Amino acid sequence: MDPEIVKALLDTGRDPNELPLVVNTKRSEHGQSNSAHMSDEESHEVENQDKADLNLLYPFHVAARPPTVEISFDKHKLRQQVVLDLLISRGADAYAPYPDGRFVF
C-alpha cells in the first residue's frame, strides 16, 4: 500500500473501517472480467452469497499483511508502519469483527 494514496483516500472522507466487498471473478480468454457479462440473476446470486465465501478485508488488516511485490524488507516495514499509523490516526479498529463473527486476533 502506498502511504500517499491511503492518505489521499482518507482525506476525501473514506472510512478506515469500511469493509469493501471484493468478488474474485475469472477472466475470459480475451482478458475481460466475467462479472461484466453476468446476468441480473447471476449478479443477484453473488450479492446473496454467504459473506464468509467472499474476500472481505479491512484496510488495517490489508496493510498489516506481508508484501505481495518485490520490495526490500526495510522499505516495506517503513511504508507499512506509515500506513498503519495513518489508519489508526483516522479511527481504524484493528480488532473489528468480520460479518461472520471472526476476528483477526
Image (cartoon, rainbow, N blue to C red):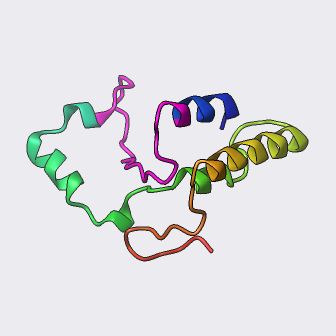
Query: Which corner quadrant holds the C terminus?
Result: bottom right
Is 71 positioned to the left or the right of 56 in the image? Answer: right
Of residues 24 and 12, which is closer to you in this image?
Answer: 12
Q: Which residues are magenta?
A: 10-34
Give the residue drawn at x 41%, y 48%: 20
Magenta stretch: helix, strand or loop mostly: loop
Exactly how many numbered labels are in the figure? 0
User: Which of these two is toward me, 45 or 60?
Assistant: 60
Residue drawn at point x = 22 percent, y = 53 percent: 47
- Residue 13's spot in the image, x, y percent? 46, 36
| Residue 7 location (% of width, % of height) | 62, 33
Question: Measured along the vertical axis of the image, is residue 68 above or below residue 65?
Answer: above
Instruction: Pinpoint residue 28: horizontal percent, then vertical percent.
Output: 33, 31
Q: Is residue 54 left or right of residue 88?
A: left
Q: Please indicate whether residue 44 sits to the left or right of residue 9 in the image.
A: left
* Image point (69%, 49%), residue name: 84
- Above-or-below relation of 59 to 52: above
Which image quadrant is residue 1 in? top right
Give the residue displayed 44% in from the left and 68% down from the top.
98
Q: Is residue 105 magenta?
A: no
Give 65 or 39, whichever is nearer the viewer: 65
Q: Is residue 49 left or right of residue 72?
A: left
**Outermost residue to the top:** 30
